[in-house]
């Protein structure tokens, strides 16, 4: 009789232990499932970290871009290659023309030397940066700003993801374009003077 009770006791303990183990296994599986679901959901809403590379966006090689950039000052390189921004009302082109230059001519990329903007489309936006209502055909590329895409908080502070303007040949950063310009385009290409050189008309 005592042996039977002892065996019954062992069976009940084993059953309880098994039940606890099953519950623990189920809990572990559930936690793993929740973690996996959260990971999938996060990857669906979080943008992939975009490349901040400049070379490769244009037609110049990275080596050629870096070689041409050696002729610039450290701050000018910072604008073109690292998307730094000059303070308003202070900018000068790489060859010394002020941000509010009113001479006739063409603005070219500081690195590529390619034509970007004609002075005929330049206007005083009151922002302190060289502003144009149109770019020369094929001169620039417009894209969502990679830095804004990487940092949603920065994008929020800027009023949303901005549209970056880069040199179509070198891929160098020039500035941003906004939809508050004058006719006929309604665009405002807000550029850094230090990302360009100015070639006056002869």
Image (cartoon, rainbow, N blue to C red):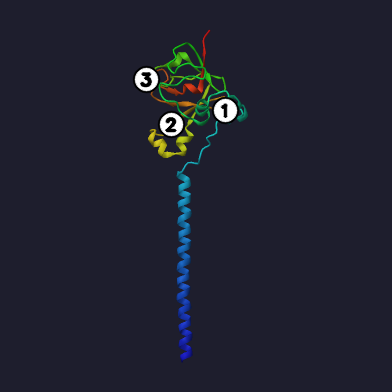
**Residue ID for mark 2:** 162
On screen, residue 150 above or below 102: below
Q: How crowded is mark 2: few (under 14 residues within 10 Å), some or many (20 or more)?
A: many
Label drawn at residue 126: 3
**Spot occupied by residue 185 in the image (x, y as percentages of width and height):** 42, 20
Q: Is residue 59 among the parts visible in the rendering?
A: no
Q: Residue furthest top?
A: 202
**Spot occupied by residue 75 in the image (x, y as percentages of width and height):** 50, 27
**Spot occupied by residue 79 in the image (x, y as percentages of width and height):** 49, 27
Q: Is residue 85 among the parts visible in the rendering?
A: yes
On screen, residue 171 above or below 31: above
Q: Which of marks 1 and 3 is nearer the N terminus?
A: 1
- 195 and 72: which one is in front? 72
On screen, residue 201 above or below 157: above
Give the CA separation, mark 3 to mark 2: 19 Å
Give the CA separation, mark 1 to mark 3: 30 Å
Camera-near label (1 vs 3) is: 3
For label 3, the SS is loop
Label drawn at residue 58: 1
Seen at 40% across and 39% down, the residue is 153
Seen at 48% across and 54% down, the residue is 36
Seen at 47% across and 77% down, the residue is 15
Q: Earlier in the sequence, mark 2 or mark 1?
A: 1
Q: Do the residues labelled 1 and 3 touch (CB within 8 Å)?
A: no
For label 1, the SS is loop
Give the CA separation, mark 2 to mark 1: 19 Å
For label 2, the SS is loop
Q: How crowded is mark 1: few (under 14 residues within 10 Å), some or many (20 or more)?
A: some
Label drawn at residue 42: none
């Amino acid at each position: 009789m005592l042996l039977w009770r002892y065996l019954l006791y062992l069976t009940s303990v084993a059953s309880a232990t098994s039940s606890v183990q099953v519950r623990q296994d189920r809990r572990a599986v559930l936690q793993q499932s929740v973690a996996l679901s959260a990971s999938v959901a996060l990857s669906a809403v979080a943008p992939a970290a975009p490349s901040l590379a400049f070379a490769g966006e244009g037609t110049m090689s990275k080596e050629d871009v870096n070689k041409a950039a050696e002729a610039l000052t450290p701050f000018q390189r910072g604008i073109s290659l690292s998307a730094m921004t000059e303070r308003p009302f202070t900018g000068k082109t790489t060859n010394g023309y002020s941000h509010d230059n009113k001479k006739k001519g063409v603005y070219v990329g500081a690195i590529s030397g390619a034509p970007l903007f004609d002075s005929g489309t330049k206007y005083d936006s009151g922002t302190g940066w060289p502003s144009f209502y149109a770019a020369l055909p094929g001169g620039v590329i417009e894209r969502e700003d990679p830095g804004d895409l990487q940092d949603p908080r920065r994008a929020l502070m800027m009023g949303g993801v901005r549209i970056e303007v880069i040199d179509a040949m070198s891929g160098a950063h020039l500035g941003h374009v906004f939809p508050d310009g004058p006719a006929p385009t309604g665009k405002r290409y807000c550029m850094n003077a230090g990302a360009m050189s100015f070639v006056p008309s002869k």
